[in-house]
Image: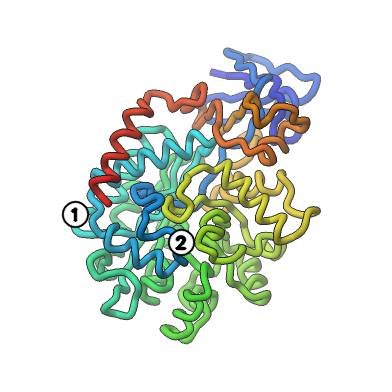
């Protein structure tokens, strides 16, 4: 089956003025100006659509959709925000996580996201199969996912930040990491599901767990993920606990490679940026979360210039409260302008970060671009709302006028969003069920 996505109003790809051809799950080729593709079975007219590579979200905590806009956490910086929420999160049950994952994945998909990464690090008793639940939900929705097997083993009793009831010991974490890698991780091109290992953050894990996770990632050829350089509190904690700055902790534990991507990456000095870039470490810029928690601004341009992969993330829906990838693109654009001035960080830069850059963070070179041989993951936006009326450059309009809902989303060659609605899912019923779960939970 060869489908021609024909004559887009605009497309974020060079040499594809007349669109692209999808064959099976891949992009078979681009159609340049004046060309007509051969052997076409079906045609989709995209004359009203701006076509992007599917957006790739590189940082989230799905379960936090249950504590959006929670009164005991709003208006607080990171550590105070975390300690207010940990006791609530400690009550998380499998069914609540399932609904949270379904809701977050659907919300992301509706915003044009075709690959999602979730960082799940909460393992209270009874929630041992958290990764399994997220994989099942991603498969049911047909979205691509990197499920990060998160972990915490440093609780209050050992000088860490989280309460004792949500952490596991190192042996349990490593054994379960291997279990889920064997069960779900697919390192092949075109994979739907990948697993990453993700010790939570310097203030909730031991140095040894970092080292052992890196060894395991090497053995199973998977990515490594953690929060790093998010706040000055974290930096002080690392100096006190380990006598090391956060980047030195990465170095000592075998994380300085393209296998690792870091959430936030704000508080690095120039020498650390150079080291991270040289090692091709990935950094996920979570602009909304950083603004809400007043954590600081990621030095995106310096990191990219140094050689780091730069991706975007919405972060957990308690610090951002929204899982909208197109909004994340606009946030990155605006804060980028504020930091670097009006000539730098263009709409094309932020779209590149949200697609190809994010894909590189996840260790993937098969998604994130509209190009022959890449996976057929696409996000199509219409410009038919009042906010776009009068817009001239359609691609710039997506970012500048604030697109936030895709009209169509294709993942692995299949339409998963049609007319702004998820295919085969009752959105109203899901919202009702998820809201109920959130009320019971919090
Ligand atoms: Zn996070």
Residue 415 visible: no
Q: Give SS at disc 2.
A: loop
Q: Image point 35% across, 67% down: which residue?
A: 83
Foreground residue, 368 or 38?
368
Where does the image place residue 378, in percent across and percent down from the top left? 57, 32
Q: Image point 31% across, 39% down: which residue?
A: 434
Q: Which mark is residue 418?
A: none
Foreground residue, 82 or 408?
82
Task: Give neighbour class at mark 1: few <14, some 14-19, many 20+ (Cα, 10 Å).
Answer: few
> In terms of image quarters, where does ligand 1 lie?
bottom left
The answer to whether mark 2 is within 8 Å of ligand 1 is: no
395 vs 241: above or below: above
Foreground residue, 7 or 108?
108
346 vs 370: above or below: below
Q: Give SS at disc 1.
A: loop
The answer to whether marks 1 and 2 mark residues whose Cβ atoms lie closer than 8 Å is no
Q: Image point 57% across, 57% down: which residue?
A: 285
């Amino acid at each position: 089956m060869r489908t021609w996505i024909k004559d887009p109003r605009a497309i974020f790809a060079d040499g594809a003025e007349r669109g692209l051809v999808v064959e099976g799950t891949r992009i078979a080729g681009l159609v340049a100006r004046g060309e007509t593709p051969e052997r076409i079975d079906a045609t989709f007219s995209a004359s009203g659509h701006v076509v992007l590579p599917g957006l790739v979200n590189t940082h989230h905590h799905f379960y936090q959709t249950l504590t959006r806009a929670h009164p005991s956490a709003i208006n607080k910086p990171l550590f105070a925000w975390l300690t207010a929420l940990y006791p609530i999160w400690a009550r998380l049950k499998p069914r609540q996580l399932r609904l949270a994952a379904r809701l977050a994945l659907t919300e992301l998909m509706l915003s044009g996201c075709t690959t999602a990464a979730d960082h799940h690090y909460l393992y209270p008793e009874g929630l041992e199969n958290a990764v399994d639940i997220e994989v099942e939900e991603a498969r049911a929705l047909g979205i691509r996912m990197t499920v990060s097997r998160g972990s915490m083993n440093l609780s209050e009793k050992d000088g860490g930040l989280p309460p004792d009831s949500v952490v596991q010991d190192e042996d349990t974490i490593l054994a379960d990491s291997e279990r889920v890698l064997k069960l779900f991780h697919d390192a092949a091109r075109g994979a739907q599901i990948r697993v990453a290992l993700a010790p939570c953050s310097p203030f909730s894990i031991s140095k040894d767990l970092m080292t052992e996770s890196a060894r395991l990632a090497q053995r199973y050829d998977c990515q490594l993920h953690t929060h790093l350089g998010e706040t000055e509190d974290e930096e002080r904690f690392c100096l006190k606990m380990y006598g090391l700055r956060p980047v030195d902790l990465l170095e000592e534990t075998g994380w300085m490679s393209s296998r690792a991507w870091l959430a936030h990456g704000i508080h690095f000095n120039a020498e650390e940026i150079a080291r991270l870039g040289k090692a091709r470490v990935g950094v996920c810029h979570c602009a909304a979360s950083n603004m809400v928690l007043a954590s600081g601004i990621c030095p995106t341009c310096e990191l990219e210039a140094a050689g780091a992969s730069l991706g975007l993330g919405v972060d957990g829906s308690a610090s951002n409260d929204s899982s909208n990838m197109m909004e994340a693109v606009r946030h990155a654009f605006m804060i980028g302008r504020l930091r670097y001035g009006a000539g730098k960080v263009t709409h094309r830069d932020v779209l590149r970060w949200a697609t190809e850059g994010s894909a590189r963070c996840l260790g993937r070179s098969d998604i994130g671009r509209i190009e022959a041989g890449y996976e057929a993951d696409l996000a199509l936006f219409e410009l038919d709302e009042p906010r776009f009326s009068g817009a001239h450059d359609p691609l710039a309009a997506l970012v500048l006028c604030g697109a936030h809902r895709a009209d169509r989303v294709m993942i692995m060659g299949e339409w998963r969003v049609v007319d702004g609605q998820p295919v085969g899912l009752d959105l109203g019923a899901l919202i009702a069920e998820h809201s109920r779960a959130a009320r019971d939970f919090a």
